[in-house]
Amino acid sequence: MGISDIMSLDVTSVWLVLSVVAVAAGVFYLYSLILRHLAKTTVRNKVVLITDSLSTLGNECAKLFHTGGARLILCGSNWEKLETLAERLMSESDPTLTFPPKLVELDFSNMESVPEVISEILECYGCLDVLIFNSSMKVKAPVQCLSLEMDRIVMDVNYFGPITLVKGVLSSLICRRTGHILLVNSIQGKLTMPFRASYAASKHAVQAFFDCLRAEVQEYGITVSTVNHTFIKTPSTNSEDEVTAKSVWTDVKPTSLGVTPKEMATELLKTLSSKKKEILMARSIPKAALYVRSLFPNLFFAIMAAGVRNTAAAEMPDD
């Protein structure tokens, strides 16, 4: 076999490989388009409740589900901002393909108002198909710097609020034998971090509640999904729902470890379509931390304690 024959074979092999790659890429692209279309049709004509529509993630979900033809019930603690959001959604969409959002003022830090809000929610359309619990309050401080009053507020917003709402609408879902309950929860519902004691406790509590609920309502055709994420990237460094007390902990968040609101909203839409029970939205480092916590707990605790000591030493003033 001559050199020209060998070169001819090499060129043929390269073209064959490139053709296979091109075909595979085309198939993957078509598959992605099909999945995207199926996901969008998932919420068409469905009654979808978003507990915090005014957050960055809530805004993205509202926009995505509204264009998908959902009958939205937008909740939030500020009526004027809710009206502004609804007006923007309507102005940016085709009114022949979408529904005007219903607005409900909801503030989980005021638990006395929640029963009345539940009645208002059920009166909007008479039923619910999808509930997205994305309300959250963050607090960052050493345990000794946090009052019990702050602990109770965090638990109200992150735990008692969501479970009160779901208990209030559960009988309606059971009667219709359908529904999808989706909890957007921090990865700290599975993994604790220093100076996040109250926040992590509330996230562990709500995670456990919805995990138990999943098993109890499955026989009624109700799906419960939990999506645990790392921090959600926002334009500002400190989100509006984050309360920072006097703290010695410097929180370093590499942007590569976070997820964007658009990524989260798209994942929630896919979850509603696939009905997956549990999703972890995290990069490799947080995932590795979860495995270390489970398999080598003493190592994990030592690393966390070392991080606290190093940060405290860095904060000490020079003599």
Image (cartoon, grey):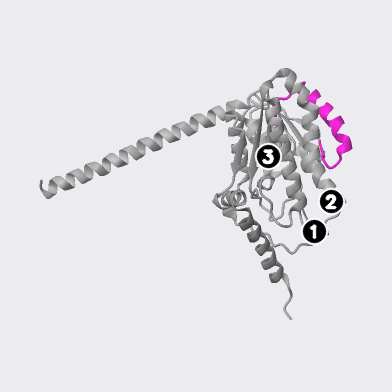
Which residue is nearer to you in this view: 289 or 242? 289
For label 2, count other residues whose C-alpha is less than 10 Å away and answer few (under 14), some (14-19) or many (20+): few
Is residue 112 part of the magenta span, yes or no? yes
The residue located at (78%, 40%) in the rendering is 159
Q: Is residue 60 left or right of residue 140?
A: left
Q: Residue 184 carries which label?
A: 3
Q: Name the residue under label 1.
A: 245
Write the residue at 73% across / 49% down.
200
Q: Distance between the residues labelled 1 and 3?
A: 25 Å
What's the residue type where badge 3 is placed? Val
Look at 84% across and 31% down and name the residue there.
117
**Secondary structure beneath disc 2?**
helix
CB-based contact (under 8 Å), mark 1 and mark 3: no
What's the amino acid at mark 1? Ala
Badge 1 density bin: few <14, some 14–19, many ≥20, Cα 10 Å: few
* Residue at disc 3, secondary structure: strand
Which of the 4 image quarters holds residue 298? Answer: bottom right
Near-viewer residue (301 or 129): 301
Give left or right: position of 68 versus 132: left
The earlier-in-sequence mark between 1 and 3 is 3
In the picture, residue 99 is in which quadrant? Answer: top right
Q: Quadrant of residue 280?
A: top right
Secondary structure beneath label 1: loop
- Earlier residue among tags 2 and 1: 2
Picture quarter with the C terminus: bottom right
Determine which residue is flagged by label 2: 150
Magenta segment range? 106-131
User: Looking at the picture, which amino acid does disc 2 mark?
Assistant: Met
